[in-house]
Image (cartoon, coloured by chain):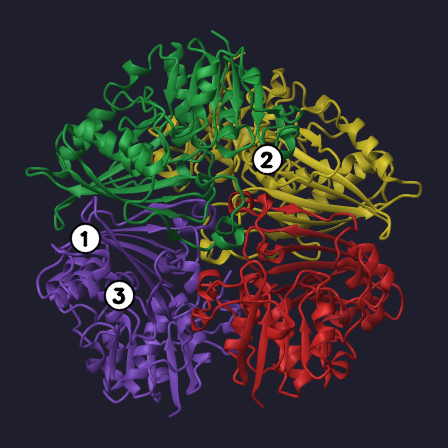
Chain colours: A yellow, B red, C green, D purple
Amino acid sequence: MAFRAAVAGASGYAGGEVLRLLLAHPEAETGALTANSNAGERLGALQPHLRPLADRVLEPTTVEALAGHDVVFLALPHGQSAAVAEQLGSDVLIVDCGADFRLQDAAAWEKFYGSPHAGTWPYGLPELPGAREALRGSRRVAVPGCYPTAVSLALFPAYAAGLVEPEAVIVAASGTSGAGKAPKPHLLGSEVMGSMSPYGVGGGHRHTPEMIQNLSAVAGRPVTVSFTPTLAPMPRGILATCSAKAAPGVSEGLLRETYAKALDAEPFVHLLPEGQWPSTAAVYGSNCALLQVAHDESAGRVVVISAIDNLTKGTAGGAVQSMNIALGLPEELGLSTTGVAP
Amino acid sequence: MAFRAAVAGASGYAGGEVLRLLLAHPEAETGALTANSNAGERLGALQPHLRPLADRVLEPTTVEALAGHDVVFLALPHGQSAAVAEQLGSDVLIVDCGADFRLQDAAAWEKFYGSPHAGTWPYGLPELPGAREALRGSRRVAVPGCYPTAVSLALFPAYAAGLVEPEAVIVAASGTSGAGKAPKPHLLGSEVMGSMSPYGVGGGHRHTPEMIQNLSAVAGRPVTVSFTPTLAPMPRGILATCSAKAAPGVSEGLLRETYAKALDAEPFVHLLPEGQWPSTAAVYGSNCALLQVAHDESAGRVVVISAIDNLTKGTAGGAVQSMNIALGLPEELGLSTTGVAP
Amino acid sequence: MAFRAAVAGASGYAGGEVLRLLLAHPEAETGALTANSNAGERLGALQPHLRPLADRVLEPTTVEALAGHDVVFLALPHGQSAAVAEQLGSDVLIVDCGADFRLQDAAAWEKFYGSPHAGTWPYGLPELPGAREALRGSRRVAVPGCYPTAVSLALFPAYAAGLVEPEAVIVAASGTSGAGKAPKPHLLGSEVMGSMSPYGVGGGHRHTPEMIQNLSAVAGRPVTVSFTPTLAPMPRGILATCSAKAAPGVSEGLLRETYAKALDAEPFVHLLPEGQWPSTAAVYGSNCALLQVAHDESAGRVVVISAIDNLTKGTAGGAVQSMNIALGLPEELGLSTTGVAP
Amino acid sequence: MAFRAAVAGASGYAGGEVLRLLLAHPEAETGALTANSNAGERLGALQPHLRPLADRVLEPTTVEALAGHDVVFLALPHGQSAAVAEQLGSDVLIVDCGADFRLQDAAAWEKFYGSPHAGTWPYGLPELPGAREALRGSRRVAVPGCYPTAVSLALFPAYAAGLVEPEAVIVAASGTSGAGKAPKPHLLGSEVMGSMSPYGVGGGHRHTPEMIQNLSAVAGRPVTVSFTPTLAPMPRGILATCSAKAAPGVSEGLLRETYAKALDAEPFVHLLPEGQWPSTAAVYGSNCALLQVAHDESAGRVVVISAIDNLTKGTAGGAVQSMNIALGLPEELGLSTTGVAP
């Protein structure tokens, strides 16, 4: 079942990664590539790593350009997806890499994004309970945020099994591509290399309500999340350190057993063998999430570490995986679990 | 008051940083430089950045070589300091950059280091309550670990004022120099660049009991610490994200006020203005610790971020600062609060 | 035409990259994986990015283990390939990623490698004149060195067309994976990050005679090469700056035309449009070499820049490309021109 | 002899480094700090590493703000220095870190900078023959470009002694701070990390005529320069690989002897012992240039490698060194030859 896909926002990091994965997808044909300020330029000048598409010219992002495709990936600034989606009609599969349709709670959306809530689409994290069912055959997919992907995959088995208390503490380090391609002084190489720095500390990061939504749904009760994101001197990757108080009776053995069982059938989420820890290098460019768990008896906490590539499993890989499900294709088609290392 | 200082372990990272700081210290004269496997080599071949000492030749680490100095800095593998210290006599100021004399609890030492406890020396973190008094005139100094420095400075004002509950959660990212200069596969540049990875997860890191010791002393009751260290792709720096449940009645205002007051007179620990966050780049090569605090009301937690240079304030700078106090010199002498950036 | 391939040296960087590419090759089945000191370990512990092979256990490198495959990739230390090859017989395709069979000149081999010359195999740089013919159907392939790949691709069109004088000056920057995975102090992340440094200056690098061999053959007369390799703070990639005096009558137009024509049919070597320059990021993990040319009229020199991934086109990608030719498969099969960026 | 210094352009990288060095200078008092778009901001928000000046507020760059100082450092965009200098009068020492007054040849200026030539000031590279004499007592200093500093120091002894032919080939790698702090897409951390890329290839870089000027003056005849700058994934440092055909009769011994003699009395430029090579890490934050030489007999070329910190010896350190000479202070005052490593 071949399909033709357009990408809106093809000059950015998310759009570029969608294209990288579509180039490796055996059923995909790459249709329109659109951009805003970069319309009219050769893709090769903006994304020189996408050699097979180097001579393609970016069109302006219009409904006309995006119409007539089987799948449209939106990698647009927040707030622009709803208008485009409405005009494209309900037959085309729209995969929104932005935040617009991720949250169910309109009040949370308005608090964190400061604009009216556009609605809620099936959530593109297939590993969460019930997610695959909602995605199957859907013509709308809301791709999760990169941090919520790393954190939800790390903690959902523990919350589903009731192994931890409902107050999660998350500290995550992200590569700089998560901050996008718009040039800002603090994202300059000179500032970033050799430096770790936090941002959005104290509950202000927009991905917090998304984590709360996912973990609360799995836990079946309200979960609070203390989330501190940090910027790390690397282009890609998220390493999330997630912990919560252990529920009574938890042991390292029970923990491992629970995770092993929960992830057993998952093609893209793996519990590492005892003694081995995830690293972002091991998932560079791959659609894998690697996990490891520990029970810190002295501190009475369960600690789960997850590593993903923020652009692959955290954005474009998750998008393609969900697209496969929505289209009825094999979920793993065109997606690799092999990273590029060292 | 000029003094002559020897450095045992001059070919490693800690020893090299001690030398870098002694070269900038107006009262220091650099005496014997010793090493083990590198004895006989020119320092310039091993530490090419220490130009003024390039032609000095390393001697074997013996009591004879170290004798006859006013100050001896030990940057030796764990477990070797006691024997050297005993033979050097009680008149010479010995500043131990290793772990041997940091812990008061012999059982904790034996659990984490697997060898008999050598004893406890005055603890070289002058900012902790009572520490300056113990250091003044002392002829023995135990330099704190790099992580405990970052974490204790971040949390002591909150624990001293009773603003947080006694269960701390710490996630810290360290530059690779913290892992030393002995070549191991996972520390190769090819492995490290572009990668974040955790280690010692679940309470196993040797710096954990040191943090517990410091924070419990300040809090006046037992504090538990869930500590996750991570290796970041940068040569230097620690960014510590420290949080604990807020005590009843805590507000952002009270928090800022408490920290401002606690740090007001400190020359090397600074609370940043609201809205500005610490970064390791800002303290590169400086003896500063930069802090910022936040009260996450939704999650009910106090979050404190600290940034230090693990080799400067976290090791050699803290060592020189404590040495100044022990010798009766001005505490800031020869130490800079200016970092090298970008 | 499916084939079964063994990899000797599967725990190193070259062997790991061969495996990464074989996993993406539609006709490849991965057979024996062998190692020396790492024999007995899970591949997942040593190459965690190769998830599909994580549970494979490394065997000792013996002829028994390597026998019975259609293809055997050797990624062994210099000097070990001949003995293995002899015993495997002449029917199996042996692709040697080491240096043993690259040089035609036994004296040059002995001068630079200090051991007896093992012989010369068909040279696996298909883009060089005559190379494809020699590779077709061959059961032996000598994979070129990474620097000679970058440099020969950059300069062969100019030398073939007589556009430059026979004295080439090359300065190339390489990522650290080119130095291998054996831990050495100068390759530690702490030493490498933030640093550029040269090595093998003044003609001492072992890749020099290989460049001379290739360029002299193309030029039809002896070419001298002044080669300075430098180590760059990145895991992968080579950027080679290659220049030589322009022959009389050379112009920028003639230069571009010559390169465009020479590379027109090449699937993996591309001249970039005017004004765009190669970067190693654009070829990260891809089998492409990107080139750009300039005629510096003031200095009277032709300058050619090439960028490759040292592990892909510079080692394992070149190996698979040559293997495809030797086996009679389509040359591009299983190889990608898409890089992983940013 | 205490002096008061103003810095125009204090929010940029060059201005920040001037301030870092002035803070360590025993005779310097820091006066006005000015900026353009950042006027009105706290320095601490823009240059958080300059803790002692964190609460200073930037003034707009006006003659009024800069008047009344003993020394004024200009770190302004090209073309703006002349107007400021004229109005400040001839008594104040003006040290221009920009390019405006570096070139003697008005035609070369106009060709490379596209604006009228402002004039020529004493050139602030004290190591060049005659430079100290011109600087002594001068009230105007043109600080050299960073690349010309690295290259001129590398080659002046060889050209002064007639050891090389007048056609130099230079390939240099620079850290990203050399490109300044104005945010541009290709300078983003995501683009820079893991990547080497060239720019200004083929004679187009503005530092080329400055190298030609310096080397021709030393050689006593016209020297041509083929210069290829590359951007390296590190914040600071320049590694320059400089070569030229060896003159008849040159040997490695003669070469070493010539350099040793030429640099013998230099406090900031050092020939390394045989077998040791310069690295940018060894001069991080120091005012040193480290050199090594080689005679490549096969290729018939002399190769000289130099490493500097582009912001220290390459800009602000050279500026302070020249200021010391102009003011009649000891040349080394306040400048360190100790780098910050690892």
Q: Is residue C100 left or right of residue A165?
A: left
Q: Residue A18: percent from the left, percent from the top? A: 51, 30
Q: Which of marks 2 and 1 is in front?
A: 1
Q: Which of B288 and C153 is in front in this view?
A: C153
Secondary structure of the residue carrying tag 2 is helix
Is residue D201 shown above or below B180?
A: above
- Pinpoint the chain carrying mark 1: D
Q: Which of marks 3 and 2 is in front?
A: 3
The residue to which callout 2 is attached is A283
Amino acid type, residue under disc 3 in the picture: Leu
Residue sitting at x 57%, y 62%: B13
Residue sitting at x 58%, y 78%: B5
Amino acid type, residue under disc 2 in the picture: Val
Is residue B226 shown above or below B17?
A: above
Secondary structure of the residue carrying tag 3 is helix
> Mark on residue D244?
1
Question: Which of the 4 image quadrants contains residue C327?
Answer: top left
Q: Nearer the viewer, residue D147 or B106?
A: B106
Say few, some or many: other residues with alpha carbon within 10 Å of mark 1 (under 14 / 14 to 19 / 20 or more): many
Q: Distance between the residues labelled 3 and 1?
A: 15 Å
Q: Residue B329: percent from the left, percent from the top? A: 63, 87
Amino acid type, residue under disc 1 in the picture: Ala
Is residue D92 shown above or below C192?
A: below
The residue to which callout 3 is attached is D153
First of labels 3, 1 by sequence position: 3
Say few, some or many: other residues with alpha carbon within 10 Å of mark 2 (under 14 / 14 to 19 / 20 or more): many
Question: Which of the 4 image quadrants contains residue B169?
Answer: bottom right
Q: Residue A14: percent from the left, percent from the top? A: 52, 37
- Split into 4 quadrants, where in the image is the N terminus of chain D? bottom left
